[in-house]
Amino acid sequence: MNFNTLPEETLRQWLALLRAPGIGAIGFQNLLQASENINEIFNNYRGLRLKKALREETCHYLDRPDWDAVDRDMHWLQQANNHIVSLHDAHYPTLLKEISDAPPLLFLHGNIEALCEPQLAIVGSRNPSPSGKETAQQFAHHLATTGLTITSGLALGIDAASHHGALRAQGSTIAVMGTGLDRIYPAQHHDLAHRIAVQGLLVSEFPPDTRVRPENFPRRNRIISGLSIGTLVVEAAIRSGSLITARCAANQGREVFAIPGSIHNPLARGCHQLIRNGAKLVETAADILEELAPLASIALQQATVEPPEISSDSQADIPEIDAEYQQLLSCIDHSPVSIDQLIERSQLSVETLSSMLLILEFKGHITANNGVYCKS
């Protein structure tokens, strides 16, 4: 199904203009506003009344647009589950449209309906601690079961953990990429990107053949926050790129959440700085749900009152705690215990243990904070 409502020739011209060097999202919109139609931009750009003169390289491009690249974009669009939506389309995300530098076009691969669901961005360090990764997965898992779509950037570390957590919950997740959608980066996330496209959506403002460019990754952060009603930072050093996402969220008028950590952990300092600057300190997923419920759907509001349902094919579909869960609970007391200690005490695998701990937390028998557990 084609979700783009622009006539084909107009879409081709938008795609050509998108590739013009030195324009960017705001420049693109300024050109559209200064012209009667997009034809005028290519045929009479020198006659437009612009607030800022076009750069020489931009003028050279407008004289000779790259129509071969546009043909490749249109061919990409014909492939299964590929979509392009413009600012004029009904499927363009409402929240993203509100930001001043909204991308004029979004390239999408996967389930486009994921854009219509309330989203929470989860971001953080590319080199997190083990407990940081666990925390990101657990928060994403819990929040995805309430109906929130988990949005992140497909990067190593917290991003990947957040996507995995949502996928494990059979929830929806969106990856906003800093490359074209046919160039997965990092390369080791090809399988993860495929799973996200099946269960959620890959998003980019860049045409499909856009290569890896360092400057594009900070640029996409405004989209991660712009799509979302809130942004959660799990672990971040003072110079972490995730703080850019948090700053974008604050500037866009969105909620910013941060998980505190040890004063001795360098990866907690960015979160502590955010909290000092007004971000909401969170210890559990319920803290986030309490804040976001008024901004999201009725289903999400109900989820703040009732614990999320556990899928029937999981080990966790136990109505009460059976002997196996009682045995695990006996390994936990009121002093904080790490996941590594619990693996040693219980002799369970990481996957089984993580799943069981999540259920014990949901049922209120234990509390989790910064990767350690204790009885409630």
Image: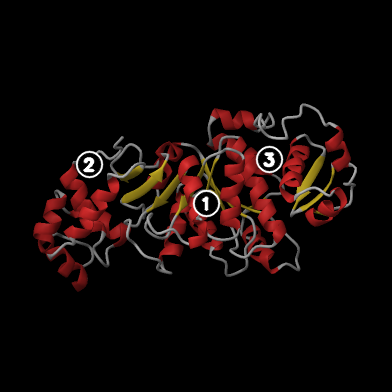
- Give the quarter of the figure containing the N terminus: top left
Badge 2, how many Cα within 10 Å: few under 14, some, many 20+?
Answer: some
Q: Nearer the viewer, residue 364 or 269?
A: 364
Q: Residue at x 64, y 49 (%)?
A: 137
| Distance of label 1 from label 3 (alpha carbons) | 27 Å
User: Residue placed at 36% from the left, 41% from the top?
Assistant: 81
Q: Nearer the viewer, residue 70 or 220?
A: 70
- Mark 1, Cα crowd under 10 Å, few <14 / some 14-19 / many 20+, is some
Instruction: Determine which residue is flagged by label 1.
Output: 192
- Residue 130 locus on image (x, y percent): 70, 59
Q: Viewed as shown, does residue 139 lie left or right of 213?
A: right
| Residue 39 placement (x, y as % from top left) | 12, 52
358 sits left or right of 332 in the view: left
The disc labelled 1 sits on which kind of residue?
A: Leu
**Which label sits in the foreground, 3 or 2?**
2
Residue 256 placement, left or right of 318:
left
- Residue that badge 3 annotates: 286
Amino acid at circle 2: Leu
Point out which mark residue 6 bears.
2
Q: Nearer the viewer, mark 1 or mark 2?
A: 1
Front residue of 271/316: it is 316
- Sequence order check, earlier mark of 1 and 3: 1
